[in-house]
Amino acid sequence: MDKADRQVLRQCRVRLVRELQVASLWDALLNRELFTPDMIEDIQRAGSGSRRDQARQLITDLETRGSQALPMFISCLEDTGQETLASLLRTSRQAAKQDLGAIRPLVLHPVVIKPVELKPEEPWKPLQGKLAPVVLGSKDLWPARPEAPRPVDIGSGGFSDVCGPDRAKGNADLAYVLNADPCGHCLIINNVNFCHESGLRTRTGSNIDCERMQRRFHLLRFVVDVKCNLTAKQMVQALVELARRDHGALDCCVVVVLSHGCQASHLQFPGAVYGTDGCPVSVEKIVNIFNGTSCPSLGGKPKLFFIQACGGEQKDHGFEVASPSPEDRTADSNPEPDAAPFQEGPGAVDQPDAVSSLPTPSDILVSYSTFPGFVSWRDTTSGSWYIETLDGVLEQWAHCEDLLTLLLRVSNAVSVKGIYKQIPGCFNFLRKKLFFKT
């Protein structure tokens, strides 16, 4: 959907949510193949299942259905007798197109600036009067200034504070207690092959990432479960099954998703990942499956999500620095983006209750392979930059550093790779430091 059509939906959103009769739309949406049956079911289950919640989710998902989504939706409204809303959208769309066409480039004319004659400044004159001298005394008598701990370079990947982590690691008020063995469950979803209709390419090299994460989290004392090539519905089912397990005797939970990705409408966590059927599952939905209501046995325990997928289509060329990167792309490397066409989310939400109904995120960390809006690079022979680096950093430093410090090392190392640039980032709602059990 283009920018003008998205703007029309944003402008009409409040009225659509208030007046849209969704029950009569389902058949029309299916007949025009605007949504799949599974997507219709997800919309019908949105929120509390009320008409307003369904209407709100339908408008949000409509932005992901391609360049002809809005005119097709207007036709569906006409087919179901909702002429008033159809007319509103049609008129607004025509006005938006006209406004867009009326924009003309600004013609700039050169302006000649004449030189200005500068007058010589008067010589500086000292202030008149008597100045009393101030005696500071010997430097030896000055009070000592305490110095803050300085970071120490400890090799590739970043820096460490001179104060070690031992003090925090043994303090339950400062760090999560991960004493259980096994520590928790780790679910890895590895989507490699996508249906032809989705238009998404095979993610060659992803199996290497999967093997790395499976081995790494097994060494970190997690029970690892790998599921490959899941549709969007199967992904949600696998996540719900994990959330419904009894985590009472465990201390942590990890979810790793390896797939194509895109931008998506969101309130808390940006981005979405694709199932093999080409249908997106938002990261926000994935995280909220593990909230306090759906998964009470993980309350107060860290829940970690690692997302290897694109955040959009933009390619980052970076900017010049003093010294060239030592890890620029080599001749035999073959990086691919985990990119797919994406849609910007709406700038605002119409209903305050849509925000307040979401659970407050706590004890959650979502680590993204790339900054929202940009591609994430994957080498077909050695796997993705993010997962390869994450695995290496965990191997070398997980025994002595907390998770956030480890992720800083990952961001630093990935940021200097390749011709096109990439920098991982995270949304952190952890309340304490997290040290893996090694």
Image (tube, grey):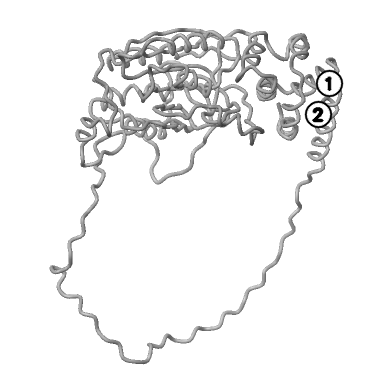
Between residue 69 and residue 47, name the one nearer to us. Answer: 47
Q: Of label 2 and label 1, which has the lower sequence position?
A: 1
**What kind of residue is marked 2?**
Leu
**What kind of residue is marked 1?**
Gln
Q: Quadrant of the C terminus?
A: top left
Q: Which residue is mark 1?
A: 82
Q: Position of residue 45 (x, y in %)?
A: 62, 14
Residue drawn at point x = 63 percent, y = 9 percent: 38
Q: Distance between the Cα atoms at labels 2 and 1?
A: 11 Å
Q: Name the element at disc 1.
A: loop
Q: Position of residue 387 (x, y in %)?
A: 40, 21
Q: Is residue 65 above or below residue 100?
A: above
**Which is more foreground, mark 2 or mark 1?**
1
Q: Residue furthest left?
A: 140
Q: Is residue 92 above or below residue 21?
A: below
Indicate left or right for 272 with 15 as reference: left
Q: Name the element at disc 2.
A: helix
Between residue 43 and residue 93, name the one nearer to us. Answer: 43
Q: Quadrant of residue 91?
A: top right
Q: Residue furthest bottom?
A: 129
Label 1 Cα crowd, 10 Å radius (few <14 / some 14-19 / many 20+) = some
Q: Is residue 344 above or below residue 144?
A: above
Query: How many callouts does the rendering have?
Result: 2
Indicate left or right for 73 with 286 as reference: right
Q: Quadrant of residue 49?
A: top right
Label 2 Cα crowd, 10 Å radius (few <14 / some 14-19 / many 20+) = many
Between residue 74 and residue 41, name the one nearer to us. Answer: 41
Q: Which residue is mark 2?
A: 89
Q: Which mark is residue 419?
A: none
Between residue 278 and residue 250, name the one nearer to us. Answer: 250
Q: Quadrant of the N terminus?
A: top right
